[in-house]
Image: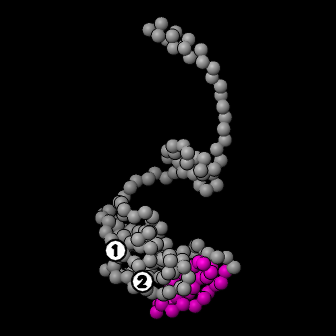
Amino acid sequence: ARTAVLLVLTTGSAHAVTTSFWTVTTQEGFAAGDLSKVSVNSGGTVLLAPPMEQLADTEELYIWSTARDAAGNLFVGTGNNGKLFKMSADGELSLLADLKDPDILCLELSADGKRLFAGTARSGFVYGIEASGSATPFHDTQQRYVWDLAFDDDGRLLAATGDDGHIYRINKQGQATLLFDSPETHIMHLQIG
């Protein structure tokens, strides 16, 4: 046993070893490594990642949006095929609606939880979706993207859009007025409060 240890030490000391240092500061740099239980944001900052558990597989390329109702059902808007899934509180996944637009970028439930609204990419439609899965165009924003949806204090639906950076206020009949015309190209998020 001593000979083996001595042989290893001798062999190890025969090779020159140098220390090298390098600095990684970008998301791309960290992506070259094997990350475990951490995430890297677009600025290159490493953060502890929340625990992840796969609940279901939609078999879609992207999940763009989610919404949860009072009964614990999770609605999942996907892309590139415009499929809307419903995962029940007990974990059963089913296809709720298949929209004509390729990406469902945002979801918002009505105050009573009986109707789901979906904002889409490519045609910029807002769809109204019933509990049965019936989906009908609710409003055409005449924009390419509906990035976010939210209800104001009066129960009117607001839609944040792009390519022209507009916010629309949509009444219960699906008719809209331009609420805000931004100098920015895209309005990505709405915060009511």
Left or right: 2 in relation to 72: right
| Discs 2, 1 touching: Cβ within 8 Å | no
Residue 142: image location, x then y, percent:
54, 86
Q: Is residue 113 visible?
A: no
Question: Callout 2 environment at 10 Å: few (<14), some (14 to 19), or many (20+)?
Answer: many
Q: Which residue occupies 54% across, 77% down? A: 145
Q: Which residue occupies 60% across, 18% down? A: 15
Foreground pick, 73 / 71: 73
Residue 158: image location, x then y, percent:
54, 82
Q: Earlier in the sequence, mark 2 or mark 1?
A: 1
Specify the label residue 144 is tagged with: none
In which quadrant of the rendered image does the N terminus lie?
Answer: top left
Residue 86: image location, x then y, percent:
35, 70
* Disc 2: which residue: 128
Residue flagged by tag 2: what amino acid is it?
Answer: Gly
Left or right: 186 in relation to 136: right
Residue 97: image location, x then y, percent:
35, 76
Q: Is residue 161 above or below residue 86?
A: below
Q: Which residue occupies 56% across, 82% down? A: 143
Left or right: 130 in relation to 17: left
Magenta stretch, residue numbers: 155-182
Specify the label residue 96 is tagged with: 1
* Secondary-structure class at tag 1: strand
